Image (cartoon, rainbow, N blue to C red):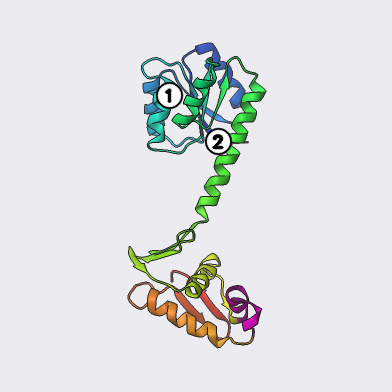
Amino acid sequence: MVNDTILLVEDEYNVSQFIQLELEHEGYKVKIAQDGQEALAFFEESEWSLILLDWMLPKLDGLEVCRRIRKQSNVPIILLTARDYIGDKIAGLDTGADDYITKPFEIEELLARIRAVMRRYKSESEEKSTDIFEVEDLVVDLKSRQVARSGTSIELTVREFDLLVFLIQNEGVVINRDALLSAVWGYDFMGETNVVDVYIRYLRNKLDRSFEPKLIHTVRGVGYVVRSS
């Protein structure tokens, strides 16, 4: 089963019932809003995997609903519209919609567009989620190469940063010195395991000396590990 939740915003009863039936047959959970204000109320109440948003709605039109949602969320939005003018479609996309489909449409096309938009959104979310690592109050941002602990910015050298990232990416796993050398310094440094000890000391001085709990631990005879306790 899919188990994704879709907010369907459509004021035409027969259309909304048909789409809901087809989506639920595919395993989606569907809730229907019949006007723009109700759509915003439902949006605030729950987390949604995707919003199917009709353009022409009572109270607030689809573009205004889309605009307001975009101020708060990147949830995928597909516009349902009877307007086939290219300028209208561009306006919808510029307002923040991820895709649009023109009525009347085949349900297979709608399902394909839903799958495509949700795949793209999940892929982007996973990509973003790997840009930032957190252990206790330590935050490491891969893109900006910034490190902070308890909100305090910490300056690291390139090598210190790379060593910390490798340890955090393997949080809870004890890494021996040879593996750390290979991953962070490369094979030219193989055999010089004392270099790892020196840089671990540098990291501890910057990350652990003035903070609790200590995050960088030594496992005697094996290597080093980052863990919260």
Distance between the alpha carbons at the discs numbered 1 and 2: 24 Å
Nearer to the camera, 174 or 120: 120
Query: Do the residues bearing badges 1 and 2 touch, measured as CB atoms within 8 Å?
Result: no
Boundaries of the magenta span: 178-190
Q: Position of residue 66 (x, y in %)?
A: 43, 28
Nearer to the camera, 187 or 179: 187
Q: Please name the predominant secondary structure of the magenta segment in the image.
A: helix
**Total numbered badges shown on the rendered structure:** 2
Q: Position of residue 196 (x, y in %)?
A: 53, 82
The residue that label 2 is drawn on is 4
Q: Confirm whether residue 152 shows in the render.
A: yes
Magenta-colored stretch includes residue 137 = no
Q: Position of residue 93 (x, y in %)?
A: 50, 29
The earlier-in-sequence mark between 1 and 2 is: 2
Tag 2: residue type? Asp
Task: Tell me if residue 23 comes above or below residue 2 in the rendering.
Answer: above
Q: Residue at x 58, y 86 (%)?
A: 193
Q: Residue at x 59, y 31 (%)?
A: 114
The residue that label 1 is drawn on is 63
